Amino acid sequence: MIWLYRVLFLPLLLLFSPYYLRRMLKRGGYGKDFHYRLGLIKGVPPRRKGVKRIWIQAVSVGELLAIGPLLSLLDEDDRFEVILTTTTSTGYTLARDRYPTKTVAVGIFPLDFWLFSALAWRRIQPDLVLLMEGERWPEHIHQALKRSIPIALINARISDRSFSRYFLFPFLGNLLLKPLDLILAATEQDHERLVTLGANVENLILTGNLKLDVEIEPQLNREQIHDLIAEMGFVADKNKPEHGMVIFLGSSTWSNEEEAILQAFNDALDAGIDCRLLIVPRHAERHREIKSLLESQSLPFHFRSISKQTPEPVMIYVADTTGELKLLTQTADLVFIGKSLPPCDGGQTPIEAAALGKPLILGPRTSNFRQICEILIETGAAQRINDVNELRKVTVELLQSKDRRVTMSTAARQWHQSNRGATQRTLGEIKKLCYEPDQG
């Protein structure tokens, strides 16, 4: 099967290259250290005797943030060292900025062609390979099998789309799941789906979602939040002191969603609510697209990439930067979770916002975090909307009702606190793979 994959890889890469090239040019940043994508990994230090080298692949920003606590625990143990790779340009920037002291090298994951993959493997020479969430690469897995190196899928998720693909192509289970030495499922639903798709039950463990253990750093106090709000140029209307100013956040928004939340924001203003709009797009590279939208309306706005401090008060603030979502979310009174409103699909993570106790609005398409979103709705921490009209209606209702927001906030914090511990469980299973039980 691996030979068929190898034969088809380059023709398929050429076939889809116009799409990926257009996407890379639009987002930018993919040219930096491009040699890594060809397997020419640099900066890998010599192996140290008695130290287990772990190669972790996390595709993008969300996964990289999720493994932060795990990297800290591994860094505290002198028996381990980590080489971290990622796929996206924003992920690569974040990994280099955030984890230089917790890893011995940071790089970009090679294209999954046998030559590029083999080159990277020869340079990295890991003792254990960890793949995050949905990362399942046939050549990468084959290189581990070829060298008898254990390979594990941690925080394993099976999205609706992946679940359907496995059913359409049953051989994928044998190619991508059966060879794995360990699979640590993020949720009960993921565990059930992996069993259905043919994962080895003996190697499949439900450990919980690593993203629930992410620490909110820095945790701002009331004065710091006030200063950050002032930095964004949000100034309360002195003519509306009775309820106070509220901030509506569009979190990790995708194309077309900014227009929808802008409509909801304008409805709130028309309803007499003293509110401000904070937009944190999922891809900072969409600066021009969002600027064009905001230039078509009359409310003053500012982009964080121009300067953090606004020169004058504004109604709309766009944080087109990387790695600041958790910081900025702390200023919000109400949060819409992006990539969940059609035509977008899948949904971004609601976990960090819930951990911060923020009332959440979720679009209809949250399959990437289906079980978590359903529980958040059941516990009263989030409210589901089905379309733009419902978003506009619910946004106004929640911004008008402080009592409802407080109730949702309490539910969100309680849910988060009761679902932590995945990092320690994951670390325990990693140690078992690396060492005999009496040494672990």
Image (tube, helix red, strand yellow):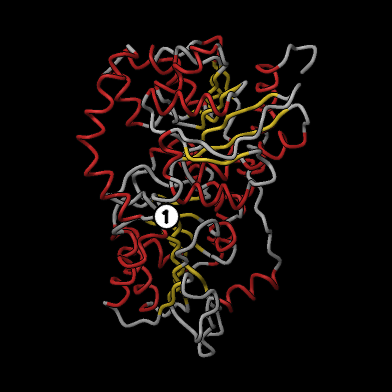
Residue found at the far left of this picture: 15
Would you say residue 418 is visible in this rendering?
no
Q: Residue 123: where, in percent of width, then height?
A: 55, 28
Q: Is residue 94 above or below residue 210?
A: below
- Give the residue displayed 32% in from the left and 74% down from the top: 294
Say which residue label 1 marks.
282
What amino acid is found at the position of numbered circle 1 in the picture?
Answer: Arg
Residue 266, given in percent of the width and then of the height, sits at 35, 74
Q: Position of residue 375 (x, y in %)?
A: 50, 39
Please tell me how many numbered marks the rendered image carries.
1
Location of residue 279 with respect to 311 vertically, above or below: above
State which quarter of the image contains the C terminus. top right
- Residue 330 lies left or right of residue 195; in this view the side is right
Rendered image quadrant of residue 429: top right
Q: Residue at x 52, y 79 (%)?
A: 234
Which residue appears at 36% of the width and 26% of the height? 113
Most foreground residue, 36 or 22: 36
Q: Tag 1's secondary structure?
A: loop
Q: Quadrant of the N terminus?
A: top left
- Taking the image as shown, residue 67 lies to the left or right of residue 289, namely right
Query: From this viewpoint, which residue is outermost toward the bottom?
Result: 239
Examine the rendering and report whether any part of residue 90 can be seen: yes
Label 1: few (<14), some (14–19) or many (≥20) C-alpha neighbours in 10 Å: many
The image shows residue 93 at horizontal and vertical percentages of 52, 52
User: From the viewer's perspective, is 126 left or right of 61?
Assistant: right
**Residue drawn at (57%, 57%) of the image:** 326
